[in-house]
Amino acid sequence: MDKTICELFAGVGGFRVGMERLNTGWQTTWFSQWEPEKVNQWAHDCYVAHFGDLADTRGEYHTREDISLMRKECIPDHNLLVGGFPCQDYSVAHTLASSHGIEGKKGVLWWQIRDTIIAKNPAFCIFENVDRLLKSPAKQRGRDFGIILACLASLNYSTEWRVVNAATYGAAQRRRRTFIFAYRNDTVYGQTMSRMQAEDIVANSGFMRQAFPIIQISNEEHGDLGAYETDEDIIRISDEFEFTFNKAGYMHEGHIYTCDIVEDEVPPILLRDILEENVAEE
């Protein structure tokens, strides 16, 4: 399988920096970064200054334009789709009651991700959003994430997720984010996972467990796969779905398993440990 990546909502290229520093051969085939209602597209320009621009399959350059105007079939092929899709509607800068979730102006950009998946059928996807995504909106908690899971299930993907506080794993920043890993069920990885129990995937064998070690599952409020299910009717989910998602979980064929976990914490890097002492000003 070719190690190829498409980055949507790429920002200044943080994900690309991380992948390239792994030195595992992953190559970016296309990206998109556009900030609405901004004359100067500083993030895009910063990305291009570091990595260069990328043409689509027509030889045209549209990385600095509204992704909703992009013909998704013209995005170069890739096996990993990534995106830190805009989170202003879920942001902690808003009160939960005033957030608009997937109904909001930027929340609707999830559909651009779905359309890209439909057009390009990548083997794997990694998405990132704020932790509040799991509880959005306040009037119908869990609906927005339920819509995302339902979309992925309808496209033959299974999904793992985890809410991660960067400080828990040694970063010098308390930053909570929801990470979503989706994979096609017909991949070798997908077929392997389908033979495992949901609890084992979350606690021992899954992608998230390997990336973010845990000590144990701390409760099993919704501990049986199928304790709750998504619905193929997205409109009905939008109108009726409400569910308490915990910070770890797994979805396969629309069946949901979710639980809380106890992380295997890594000691943080403290500022005093990295400051240089007695450095004279030049």
Image (tube, rainbow, N blue to C red):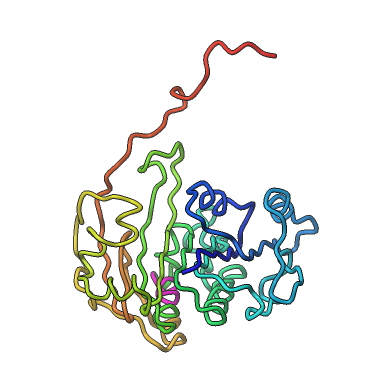
The residue at 57%/59% (across/down) is 27
Queried whether the magenta region covers residue 215, the answer comes back as no
Q: Nearer the viewer, residue 240 or 98?
A: 240
The residue at 45%/81% (across/down) is 238
In the displayed structure, does residue 62 sit left or right of residue 127?
right
Estimate the x, y position of residue 114 in percent, counting from the top left. 53, 77
Which image quadrant: the C terminus?
top right
Q: How many marks?
A: 0
In the displayed structure, does residue 80 sit left or right of residue 49?
left
Q: Nearer the viewer, residue 180 or 241?
A: 180
Estimate the x, y position of residue 138 in percent, counting from the top left. 43, 67
The residue at 49%/60% (across/down) is 129
Q: Magenta: predominant secondary structure element? A: helix
Estimate the x, y position of residue 199 in percent, counting from the top left. 21, 65
Highlighted range, magenta: 142-149
Q: Residue furthest right?
A: 39
In the displayed structure, does residue 190 sit left or right of residue 2?
left
Estimate the x, y position of residue 92 in percent, counting from the top left. 50, 54
The residue at 74%/53% (across/down) is 45
